[in-house]
């Protein structure tokens, strides 16, 4: 497992859920990469769905409820942040969390 954290003054999150990328913002970006075999392409669209469970979990018996990533994404969005992943099937997955250093001003839109 590899964990990285960085501060970026003009971070631009990727396009998520078919929406265009957000405007650049000052964010703290945390990434976790595992080398457990990645997420198969046919499962990638469901990873953040509530009750999704991998067919081959990295650690059997741990996190078997299928709600962890959906809750994590909801919490990220509640804090005006973003959570996404990139995966190479058979190799690795990288999950990235980006949270703003300053919350948006009242009335500013946020569309993760």
Image (cartoon, grey):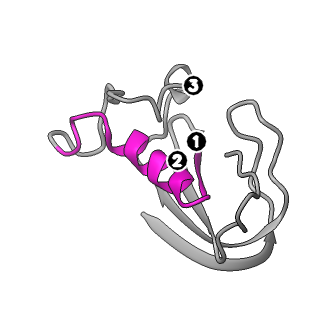
Q: Residues within 10 Å of mark 1 (few under 14, many from 20)?
A: some
Residue drawn where x is 36% and y is 27% of the image: 52
Looking at the image, the residue that sits furthest to the left is 61
Q: Position of residue 102 (x, y in %)?
A: 66, 76
Which callout, 3 or 2, points at the residue further toward the start of the chain?
A: 3
- Indicate the quadrant containing the N terminus: top left, top right, bottom left or bottom right: bottom left
Which residue is label 2 attached to? 93
Query: At x 75% / y 52%, what residue is drawn?
Result: 109
Marking on residue 87: 1
Q: Nearer the viewer, residue 7 or 61?
A: 7
Circle 3 Cα neighbour tier, 10 Å, few/some/many (<14 / 14–19 / ≥20): few
User: Which stretch appears magenta?
Assistant: 62-86
Residue at 74% x, 77% y is: 8
Alpha-carbon span between mark 3 and mark 2: 12 Å
Give the mark, 1 or 2, whose residue is nearer the N terminus.
1
Where 104 sits versus 9, above or below? above
> What residue is at 76 percent from the left and 48 percent from the top?
14
Q: Can you identify the residue that label 3 sits on?
A: 41
Residues at marks 1 and 2, CA–CA distance in whole angstroms? 4 Å
């Amino acid at each position: 497992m590899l964990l990285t954290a960085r501060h970026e003054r003009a971070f631009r999150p990727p396009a998520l859920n078919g929406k265009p990328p957000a405007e650049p913002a000052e964010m703290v970006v945390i990434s976790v990469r595992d080398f457990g075999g990645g997420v198969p392409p046919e499962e990638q669209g469901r990873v953040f769905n509530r009750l999704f469970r991998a067919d081959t979990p990295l650690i059997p018996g741990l996190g078997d409820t299928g709600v962890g990533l959906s809750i994590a994404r909801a919490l990220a969005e509640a804090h005006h942040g973003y959570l996404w992943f990139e995966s190479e099937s058979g190799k690795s997955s990288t999950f990235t969390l980006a949270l703003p250093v300053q919350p948006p001003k009242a009335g500013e839109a946020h569309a993760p």
